[in-house]
Amino acid sequence: MLLSIEDLHKSYLGPEGPVPVLRGVTLSLNAGETLALTGESGSGKSTLLHLVAGLAAADGGRVLLDGQQVTTLDDRGRARLRRRTIGIIFQQFNLIPSLNVAANIAFQARLNGVPEARELSRLARALGLESQLKKYPEQLSGGQQQRVAIARALAARPKLILADEPTGNLDEATADDVMEQLLALVAQNGATLLMVTHSRRLAARLGRRAHLSEGHLA
Ligand code: ADP
Ligand code: MG
């Protein structure tokens, strides 16, 4: 098992006290599985991804990732786990504007050492970015920017990809294209994918589906 989420609880402090968002979420993913997470806006999908990535702390419960308990690691341990084990893809691409496409793709892998040039060019080719490598993010379309973000997330060969509505800002045809490439690369790398999506159509393409409602998964 790659990821095990056990009875996870999280509240945020509102003006009238704590507001529970996750009320005991339990979920396991085996290596190589792909899961689509759906749920209404505000149901806590992004919160769940943040807790898995160790970007926020849970109030209770455990997250075990690749044999490590994310919930009890210190900041440095969580940063290392994120760098080595997790690739994150956001809805807003989050590319670094001052770096060209090639440098953006290499960015996360570089934090772990010298990225493999062969791996980087394999990704660029798979995502149709070969002729864009010297361009800057602002010179790219939304679909191209998201392809760069996908390449960046995969470049360090993470075991787990967390994707938060990765195609939410793209038109339907582009979203389908980008999803196709993401799923192919995830499969090639043997990676595990936990993806938030609003789209039932895209959710249907993944191996498993889970729905978050009232703080629980169903
Ligand atoms: P989703 O991704 O499903 O739309 P979120 O996880 O972003 O939902 O948010 C779940 C709930 O928690 C929402 O009501 C949101 O307003 C609240 N929330 C999220 N992040 C914070 C935060 N940092 N501080 C306070 N409230 C938050
Ligand atoms: Mg969200």
Image (cartoon, rainbow, N blue to C red):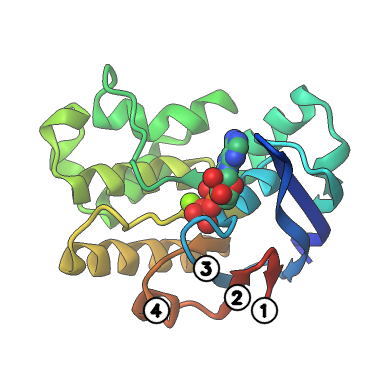
Instruction: Name the N-terminal-most of marks 1 and 4.
Output: 4
The residue labelled by disc 2 is 210
Instruction: Name the N-terminal-most of marks 3 and 2.
Output: 3
The residue labelled by disc 1 is 218
Which residue occupies 39% across, 79% down?
200
Residue 28 image position (x, y, % from top left): 75, 69
What is the three-letter code of the residue carrying label 4?
Arg
Q: Nearer the viewer, residue 164 or 40?
A: 40
What is the three-letter code of the residue carrying label 3?
Gly
User: How much space separates mark 2 and mark 4, taking CA atoms?
Assistant: 11 Å
User: How much space separates mark 1 and mark 4, taking CA atoms?
Assistant: 15 Å
What is the three-letter code of the residue carrying label 1?
Ala
Q: Nearer the viewer, residue 19 or 174?
A: 19
User: How much space separates mark 3 and mark 2, taking CA atoms?
Assistant: 9 Å
Helix, strand or loop under label 1: loop
Helix, strand or loop under label 4: helix
Residue 38 image position (x, y, % from top left): 51, 69
Q: Disc 3 or disc 4, which is closer to the eye?
A: 3
What is the three-letter code of the residue carrying label 2?
Ala
Q: Nearer the viewer, residue 200 or 93?
A: 200
The residue labelled by disc 4 is 200
Instruction: Name the N-terminal-most of marks 3 and 1.
Output: 3
Instruction: Name the N-terminal-most of marks 2 and 1.
Output: 2
Which residue occupies 50% across, 26% down?
110
Image quarter (top left, top right, bottom left or bottom right) of the N terminus? bottom right
